[in-house]
Each structure stands twice: as C-alpha cells, then as structure tokens.
Image (cartoon, rainbow, N blue to C red):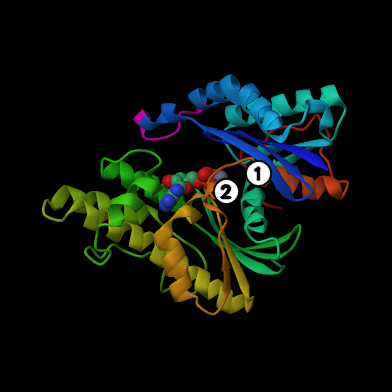
Amino acid sequence: MKILGIETSCDETAAAICVNGEIISSNLSSQEIHNKFGGVIPELASREHEKVLNLIVHKTLQDANYRLSDLDGIAVTQGPGLSGALITGCSFSKGIAFGLNIPIIGINHLEAHIFANFLADPSLLFPFVCLLVSGGHTQIWKVNNFGDYELLGETRDDAAGEAFDKGARILGLGYPGGPEIEKLAKNGNPKSVNFPRALLDSNNLEFSFSGLKTSLLYFVESDKNTKIEDIAASYQFAIIDVLVQKLNLAVQDTGFQSCVIAGGVAANSFLREYIEKKIPDKKIIFPDLKYCTDNAAMIAFLGEKYLKKGIKTNIGFSIMPNMRIA
Ligand code: KG4
Ligand code: ZN
C-alpha cells in the first residue's frame, strides 16, 4: 500500500509516504516564528501550516517519484493537538481523500509516537513497556499488542517536555527548551544543585514536574554564583532521574523484556545514556532522532497498519484536540 501521512498537530508541518512498512520519503517544516515568543502561538501555527502544507506534500510526492493518483490512502493526525492546527491538516487530507476517492484514517498522534519505534527496530515484538515523553504528555504504557494498551501512570501536572521548555524560559534560553538545556548541560555538573524529585518515594507510576520548575525559579532568583551549565545539567538530571526510576519500576512490575521510549524528549542524549546504565538487563529501543520529535513518517506508518486491516475513518470525522489513546 502507498500511504501518505500528514502531521500538523502543533508547530511542525510534515508529510511522508509509507509503502509496505517502509518510509520512502519524509519532509518537515519547523515553524521558527514561535521561537521569539518562547512557546507556540496557536493562531500563528495554523496559518503557517496553511502556507506550507501544499508545498511539503508535493515535495514528498516528488521525492518518492509518485503522483497523487498513485496513493492508496491518507493518514492524518486527528489529535491530540491544537484545534486550528489539526483542522488545517485534516481538512487538507479530507480534500485529497475525497478527490481521489481513497480511504482516510484519523491517527492518534501519541499512538504514532509509540509506533515510531518499529521504524527504528522492525523486529520489535509485543508486549513492551513504553515511556511516552513529549511536550504535552508524560505517560507509561503497557503495550500488550496492536490496539491493546494499558495506561500504568502519567503526570499529574506538567509534562517532561513542558518542564524542559519552562525551565529553558526561566534560564533565558530559546524554544524548544529541551535541546537548549541538553546543549548547556553537556558542559555542566548534574550533581551541582540538588533539585527535588517529586513522588519518587510513592510506589506508583505517577509524575509531577510543576514543583521542580518552581524550585528552579527560586534557585535562579536567589543564587548568583552557580554556572548556568551546572544549573542546566542539574535540572535536566532531576527530570531524567525521575523518568528512568519510574520506568524501571514499570519494567520490573510487568516483567516485560523490552521497553521503548517515545516522543520529543526521547531525543535527549543524557536520557538515552542514563536508561542504558540504569536498566541494563532489558532491550531498550529509541526512535531515530528524526522520528522522536513530531514527524509524518510515524503517522503514515501507523496509518498503513490500520488501513491494511481495513480500518478507516468516516470522512466526516472531527478533530479531537484532547484525544487519548483508547
Ligand atoms: O513529541 P514532540 O515533538 O511534540 C509533542 O507531541 O509535544 O515533543 C516536543 C517536546 C518539547 O517539549 C521539547 O522541548 C522536547 O520535546 N524535546 C527535548 C529534546 N528535543 C525535544 N527534550 C529534551 N531533550 C531534547 N533533546
Ligand atoms: Zn508529538
């Protein structure tokens, strides 16, 4: 099957084509317009998607040497995400599906993040544990099979990516904050400041990052001696220490042999090293760096899986800004 995937849930406009489980072309345009605001401005995001989506889709078809008429189906992010941003991608995709009379499937962006791990390791087998860490979500999933998922725990407040973004803003760094903090942290001492690790002594798989952000704010206001590299490294360590300890708990509880990491924070090199060190006896899989943050390859890949099973969405579907994994 030749499936076109489209992703416009936040500030990345992306298209990709998947053919029998393989990504044969993938393009993406990151909206830099938000950088100066320190976060995504929803109205601007929708307008930017509308401006570039046609170009990105055409480039993706060109790279694959396909015409629109070669496509067998369309997969598009239905949610979660920003309403206006989702509407641009879904309306565009419905137009193509209607015009070509081909099936369309609305994809859950979070489920697609999990499945990006099959692009990194096609031999990955169910069941596995997934740590899903993005800008809006921090969750641990028990992934029993395709379509059979159990939520083991999630954050009570901020997501891990959000903690990076808000921390970066406090430190006067750019957006998105994760890569900025990671860069500085490479030259800092992670044990320099002992930032709090919430809910670690509770034996559950819930997270809380809002207190950490506040404690960074108080620290920065009261301390003028610690190097910013040391603060960044310590702050990053506090987020990642909690993620990895909770993940370890989930892996031990389930007894599963494999665990996968998904979402933008999975790009973090300290997280990658620390997991390998702390959970050495399990198979750990990370998506390729280009498929950690938002992309359309994961949408096309998951879309093809559904469409191959004959599962499609009625073309009258609505966007779901708060869509959850069923
Ligand atoms: O998955 P994603 O691209 O978008 C959402 O679905 O939310 O995740 C974006 C989040 C942002 O909060 C960003 O700061 C974080 O992922 N991120 C990182 C890194 N790269 C992106 N966090 C830590 N280290 C990174 N290298
Ligand atoms: Zn995402």
Q: Residue at x 83, y 41 (%)?
A: 312
Residue 297 vs 64, above or below: the answer is below
Residue 276 vs 311, above or below: the answer is below
Magenta-colored stretch includes residue 37: yes
Label 2 belongs to which residue?
291
Residue 204 seen in this snapshot: no
What is the spatial separation of the Cα atoms under label 2 and label 1, in whole angstroms?
A: 7 Å
What kind of element bears circle 1? helix
What kind of element bears circle 2? helix
- Whole-percent x, y for residue 27 in the image: 60, 35
Label 1 belongs to which residue?
297
Q: In this orientation, which residue lies closer to the viewer: 205 or 12?
A: 12
Quarter of the image holding residue 261? Answer: bottom right
Cβ–Cβ under 8 Å for marks 2 and 1: yes
Q: Residues within 10 Å of mark 1 (few under 14, many from 20)?
A: many
Magenta-colored stretch includes residue 250: no
Residue 129 vs 94, above or below: the answer is below
Amino acid tagged 1:
Ala
- Whole-percent x, y for residue 122 in the image: 70, 60
Amino acid tagged 2:
Tyr
- Whole-percent x, y for residue 274 in the image: 42, 68
Q: Residue at x 33, y 50 (%)?
A: 183
Furthest residue toward left? 225
- Left or right: residue 31 versus residue 93 is left
Per the rendered image, the range of residues in magenta is 36-42
Answer with mark 2 or mark 1, whichever residue precedes in sequence: 2
Residue 67 vs 79, above or below: the answer is above
